[in-house]
Image: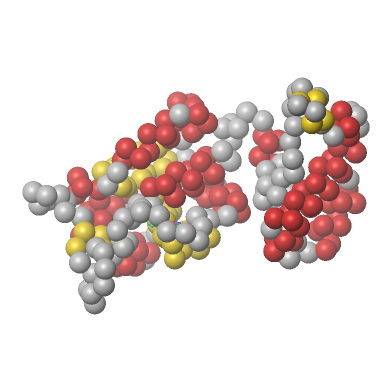
């Protein structure tokens, strides 16, 4: 997978050189290219923003600069374009799975009050363009949102996670864990400061362990995110529980 990221703060993406994503880049599973938007601003101050039409606070990012940058980066290619914004569709594990199936993603990191909407309109006629939010809060720019999305997407690519199983058992992963939160996890020692590991996890009985884990996932989901259960139909719940 090729990832292009356009930003006025390319240094934000240094973390993509470490851990799982860094190793995926070394192996060639991920081809990450970060671009400085100001390289396409031609005035002496490398200006990338201006005041909003209609008035109001803040500044809006200029369409001309973005247009030249995106044209240069994609050429005649057709990546899927992702624009992080608080007003976008929610970024979910399901969307991460979908984006992990793409060959080429282009991330446009807006700052200030956002990118002139004509940029998304212009490229929306040629590319699949999604405006995406990572949550109901406001950031200073899209860079952190891109880091979140690249990690969530990258870990789903073949060979990136050492143990494929751990992606399958993720919270929100499709299948048995869809819309369920992961339950508690434990490792050695069996007793730590008087806290014991649940006996079932030491039993070696895989069926009982699987049932206990699903029960714990359901309990945690009811306690923390009950609205997620509304999205699981009774048949699905029953099917997976019956399987256990
Ligand atoms: O708050 C933002 C500002 C700029 C770009 C993206 C965001 C955002 C907030 C939540 N998801 O994305």
Relative to 118, say whether 143 is above or below.
Answer: above
Task: State the residue at coordinates (15%, 49%).
Answer: 46
If the picture is divided into quarters, which one holds ligand 1?
bottom left
Horizontal arrangement in the rendering, residue 242 relative to residue 219 (left or right): right
Residue in front for this viewpoint, 89 or 139: 139
Pinpoint residue 222: horizontal percent, then vertical percent.
Answer: 76, 57
Report the residue that reaches farthest toward the front.
Answer: 193
Question: Would residue 204 be visible to someone looking at this image?
Answer: yes
Q: Residue at x 53, y 60 (%)?
A: 90
In-image side of 79 versus 240 (left or right): left
* Picture coordinates of residue 181, whole percent (x, y): 70, 49
**Foreground pick, 4 / 85:** 85
Q: Is residue 105 visible?
A: no
Residue extending furthest toward the bottom: 54
Q: Give percent across and percent down for residue 229.
A: 74, 61
- Tell how many labels: 0
Which residue is at 81% across, 24% downward?
Answer: 190
Quarter occupied by the C terminus = top right
Nearer the observer, 38 or 222: 222
Which quarter of the figure has residue 182?
top right
Instruction: Looking at the picture, tell me which residue is in the foreground, 30 or 78.
Output: 30
């Amino acid at each position: 997978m090729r990832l292009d990221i356009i930003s006025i703060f390319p240094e934000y993406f240094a973390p993509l050189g470490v851990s799982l994503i860094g190793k995926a880049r070394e192996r060639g599973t991920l081809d990450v290219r970060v671009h400085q938007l100001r390289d396409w601003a031609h005035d002496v101050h490398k200006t990338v923003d201006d005041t909003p039409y209609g008035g109001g606070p803040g500044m809006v990012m200029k369409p001309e600069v973005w247009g030249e940058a995106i044209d240069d980066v994609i050429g005649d290619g057709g990546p899927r374009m992702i624009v992080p914004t608080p007003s976008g569709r929610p970024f979910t594990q399901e969307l991460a799975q979908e984006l992990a199936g793409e060959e080429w993603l282009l991330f446009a990191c807006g700052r200030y009050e956002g990118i002139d909407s004509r940029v998304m309109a212009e490229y929306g006629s040629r590319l699949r363009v999604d405006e995406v939010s990572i949550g109901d809060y406001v950031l200073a720019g899209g860079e952190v949102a891109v880091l979140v999305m690249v990690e969530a997407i990258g870990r789903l690519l073949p060979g990136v996670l050492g143990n494929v199983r751990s992606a399958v058992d993720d919270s929100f992963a499709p299948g048995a864990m869809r819309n369920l939160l992961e339950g508690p996890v434990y490792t050695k020692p069996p007793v730590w400061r008087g806290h014991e590991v649940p006996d079932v996890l030491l039993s070696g009985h895989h069926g009982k362990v699987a049932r206990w884990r699903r029960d714990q996932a359901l309990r945690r989901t009811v306690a923390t995110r009950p609205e997620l259960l509304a999205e699981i139909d009774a048949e699905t719940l029953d099917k997976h529980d019956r399987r256990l």
